Amino acid sequence: MFISCGDTPSDQEDLLIFTNVTIWDGVSQTMEPNSALVTSNGRVVDILDMNDPDFPEEAETVDLNGGFVIPGLINAHGHVGTARGLETGPDIHSEENVRDQLALYARYGVTTVVSLGDEPQEAFTVRDQADFSANGLARLFLSGPVLNPSTPEEAFDDVGDLMQNNPDWTKIRVDDGLGQREKMQPEVYSAVIEASHEQGVPLAAHIVALEDAKGILEHNGDLIAHSVRDEEVDRELIDLMLERDICITPTLTREVSVFVYAERPDFFDDPFFLGEADPDVIEQLEDPDVQQRYTGAAADYFREALPLATENMMTLHNAGIRVAMGTDSGPPARFQGYFEHMEMEMMEEAGMTAPEVLRSATRYAAECMQIDDEIGTLEPGKWADFVVSEENPFETITNLRTIQGVYIGAIEVQR
Ligand SMILES: [Zn+2]
């Protein structure tokens, strides 16, 4: 406890203490009851026992009424600003749309999103200019256009062009779209990875097949951005991932989104969904012509692949590989904020414990996305980004739905 030693009066004046909580700091195995989260200028200073004799009585306090506090959720694989409702394309690109989506994530407790590809230029403006905590916006990390070079030379050029925007990640797709297009070849993706690393930027790869996941790892890629969906993962993949401590974002809800709207999904009656969903979008998705778009070969493929994707996630998790919660939310009908809760609930249903899911959605997501210097846990010095719920999320993830407050840099998000 370092706030009591050598504190000057001005230090005390800056303190903002959230009292009367049961708290998980993102690191410990257990939650601490009867605690207080001490912050200063938006950052964590300490976690104290409410009965600590050195409890600073003079500081400003916010009583959180016995709520449960966890670090803010991090979506390790989302997309921001690429769609509005079911619409995509340049007409909907705007800073306002990016901000609206970051606010939506934040209201669901997702205080950071790593957007993995194809964001409009406006998203970079928001990333570079926004005061996230003052405006109730989820913190934003970006990768820019998904690169698709056809030669190694082009790969170096494309990565070079990307660097004007100072991306946090680069992103590629190694996937033939179920035979609809040519798949990026190893010599090409290997060049993209090398070029990215020369710029100090990690690379995330969209894959479907086990073979391609291995190829990415053999060529030093830094994130497997979806589940393996064509066959069971094997020892070779596990060893490749463990060797360089590489993570996976399962994006199970991405699979759900490609077939679930063929019929009216149950969650269209879920108040937790309806609280934020645009009624016009729901109505469009109930239109039989639109429902038709969620049928066919791709829908069938991914519907059938979902149980395998889930099983593969658990195999990797049980082998000690870090699973980072990621949804691929943001494209049409992948509902930002709600899908992160659905993803976590699917992870729990698959066999992860609630604390494991929470770790995956906070500390691991931060570590895997290489943004853990300032977020992911409530350790001293990090941003005071946190979610307060009425029920204990360590018992079951669905308890996180009882959100009582969301704080970014110790400032409450308007909900
Ligand atoms: Zn994606």
Image (cartoon, rainbow, N blue to C red):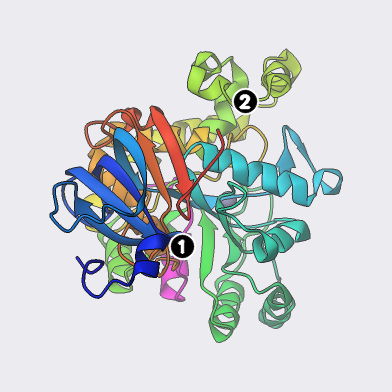
Of 410 and 147, the residue lying toward us: 410
Task: Respond yes or no on whether mark 1 lies under 8 Å from ligand 1.
Answer: no
Label 1: how many Cα within 10 Å (few below 14, some 14–19, many 20+): some
Q: Is residue 82 visible?
A: no
- Asked whether 328 or 207 is in front, the reply is 328
Q: Is residue 103 above or below residue 304?
A: below
Q: Which mark is residue 41?
A: 1
Query: Callout 2 environment at 10 Å: few (<14), some (14 to 19), or many (20+)?
Result: some
Q: Would residue 401 appear left or right of 178 to someone viewing this image?
A: left
Q: Residue at x 54, y 18 (%)?
A: 265
Q: Amino acid at mark 2?
A: Ala
> Which residue lies at the image location 53% right of the left edge and 37% below the top edge?
107
Q: Position of residue 133 (x, y in %)?
A: 55, 53
Upstream in the sequence, badge 2 or badge 1?
A: 1
Q: Does the stretch in magenta take in 213? A: yes
Look at the picture and state if 359 lies above or below 306.
Answer: below
Q: Is the residue under label 1 in contact with that under label 2 (CB below 8 Å)? A: no
Q: Nearer the viewer, residue 404 or 240?
A: 404
Which label was assigned to residue 169?
Answer: none
Q: Quadrant of residue 332?
A: top right
Q: Residue furthest right?
A: 91
Determine which quarter of the picture holds residue 97: top right
Q: Which residues are magenta?
A: 212-232
| Image coords of residue 355 (percent x, y) | 24, 43
Q: Which residue is mark 2?
A: 277
Q: Is residue 404 visible?
A: yes
Which element is circle 2 on? loop
For badge 1, the amino acid type reads Asn
Q: Is residue 72 left or right of residue 181?
A: left
